[in-house]
Image (spheres, rainbow, N blue to C red):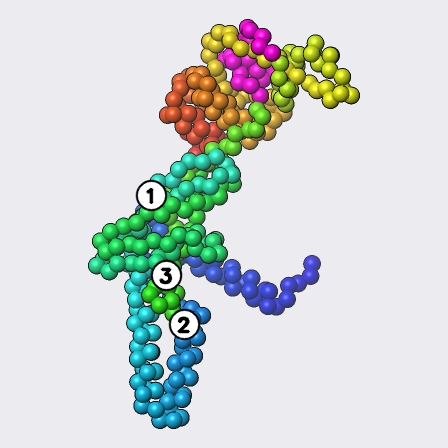
Amino acid sequence: MARLPLGARIFAWLRGRRSTWRERTTARDRGEVELDQRRVYILPTRAGLGFGALLLALLVGSINYSLGLGFGLTFVAAACGLVDMIYTYRNLAHLHLRPGRAGAVFAGEEAPFELQLSNRTRLARFAVWIDLDTATDPRHAVDVAAGSGATVVLGGASKQRGWMKAPRVRLSTRFPLGLFNAWSYWQPDSRALVYPFPEQDAPPLPVSGHPSPDGFGSAGSDDFAGVRSYQPGDPLRQLAWRQIARLDPSLGGQLVSKLFEGGSLDELVLDLEAIEPRLGLELKLSRLTRWVLEAELRSLPYALRLGRQSIASALGPAHQAACLEALALYGIAGEER
């Protein structure tokens, strides 16, 4: 393998050191956090560097030409810069940060994390920018009045089911003149639950607690209601062979399945072990997630079985949340109930 240029290696090393330093800074963040003096960092902006160069030019010119007014202008401008530095720092220091609620989402969606800022001082805070540490430019700006608070909701992209830890947050401000940039990092002590993403075009709901070998129940198919396009996973016994035989493949014929309505449902059981064994675990959980949502939509009481874990038949938002949580945490070490 070709070695990277020296400049690239130095840049990668500095980036790694910066990441390690940020992790150390926020490693002990638990519950409510106060941005004390050691957690607020400040540096001049590009405008601040230009302002400093201008002050240097004014000072050199005043010395060369012995300009009394030039000295006065230089010192007054420098004093304004120092005051701006102090106010920029104070605009961020001693804010209290507390994590709020984190809503549950399906894998692939943005998980909302509620963050609360509290200002317990007599100094109002203006234009405090807050966003994820990975964001290039902050998107949320808040003003926090003296003795008051503010709430911000940030979205973090979820990748897989289970508990998702809140991403690290960066707070910054350039108030009031923009000559200095003060910033700080915070690791909110919260997490969001990520459900498996519902399978698209999932097979019909199983309608019995006694599934057949192909993974589908035997009850609930009393009244023939027509045919529909074949969906992957439909059992062979459900195919409408007569209709299929009438379709000419050269004319775009395709497989169709019988559609039934009515029938008596003794119990609707969503059983992980009843799904086709050839499917992977994540696809099975994705299918069960779709069935849970569909059963709720159709107001059909249902039970859930995940190996040794069983949730009794019921219906409603609380039951749905319990089933989706069980699906989200199934097989995850230390999280499964």
Seen at 62% across and 14% down, the residue is: 227
Q: Nearer the viewer, mark 1 or mark 2?
A: 2
Which amino acid, mark 1?
Gly
Mark 2: secondary structure: helix
Which range of residues does the magenta coloring cover?
203-226
Relative to 165, residue 249 above or below? above
Q: Is residue 214 visible?
A: yes
Tag 1, which secondary structure?
Answer: strand
- Disc 1 to disc 2, how far (Cα)? 36 Å
Residue at numbered disc 3: 173
Q: Earlier in the sequence, mark 1 or mark 2?
A: 2
Task: Identify the residue position indicated by label 2 in the image.
Answer: 48
Q: Neighbour class for label 3 at 10 Å: few (<14), some, many (≥20)?
A: many
Check disc 3 and report its element: helix, strand or loop.
Answer: strand
Q: Residue at x 43, y 55 (%)?
A: 138
Local crowd size for mark 2, using a 10 Å CA cut-off: few (<14), some (14–19), many (≥20): some
Q: Amino acid at mark 3?
A: Thr
